[in-house]
Amino acid sequence: MDKDRIKGMADQAKGSIKETAGKATGDAKLQAEGQADKVKGKVENAVGGAKDAVREAADD
């Protein structure tokens, strides 16, 4: 598993927590930051998945 995928999953989790906390406290800024972190995490996860696929293809 590529390090980008791991970082992406961590950012998605962090984003979910921030978003939930923002909703619970009525803090729109925190909620938006959480959503941004989730998107960033999804992108990192996708990049890591692509790197894994390239590695696997090279190994075959």
Image (tube, helix red, strand yellow):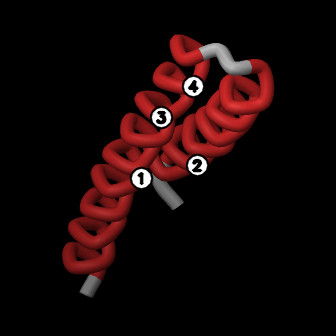
The label shown at residue 15 is none
Q: Which tag is nearer the camera, tag 3 or tag 1?
A: 3
- Asked if residue 40 lies left or right of residue 32, the reply is left
Is disc 1 placed on a helix, strand or loop? helix
CA distance for labels 3 and 4: 6 Å
Q: Tell me the amino acid under the disc marked 3.
A: Gln
Dividing the picture into quarters, in which one does residue 19 lie? Answer: top right
**Residue name at image x 21 percent, y 74 percent:** 58
Q: Amino acid at mark 1?
A: Asn
Marks 1 and 2: CB-CB under 8 Å?
yes
For discs 3 and 2, the disc positioned in front in the rendered view: 3
Image quadrant containing the C terminus: bottom left
For the residues marked 3 and 1, what is the alpha-carbon distance in whole angstroms?
Answer: 15 Å
**Callout 3 environment at 10 Å: few (<14), some (14 to 19), or many (20+)?**
many
Amino acid, disc 4:
Gln
Q: Which residue is mark 1?
A: 45
Residue 43 in percent (x, y) is at 32, 46
Estimate the x, y position of residue 38 in percent, counting from the top left. 48, 40
Residue under label 4: 31
Q: Indicate which label's residue lies in the foreground, 2 or 4.
A: 4
Residue at 38%, 41% in the rendered image: 39
What residue does disc 2 label? 9
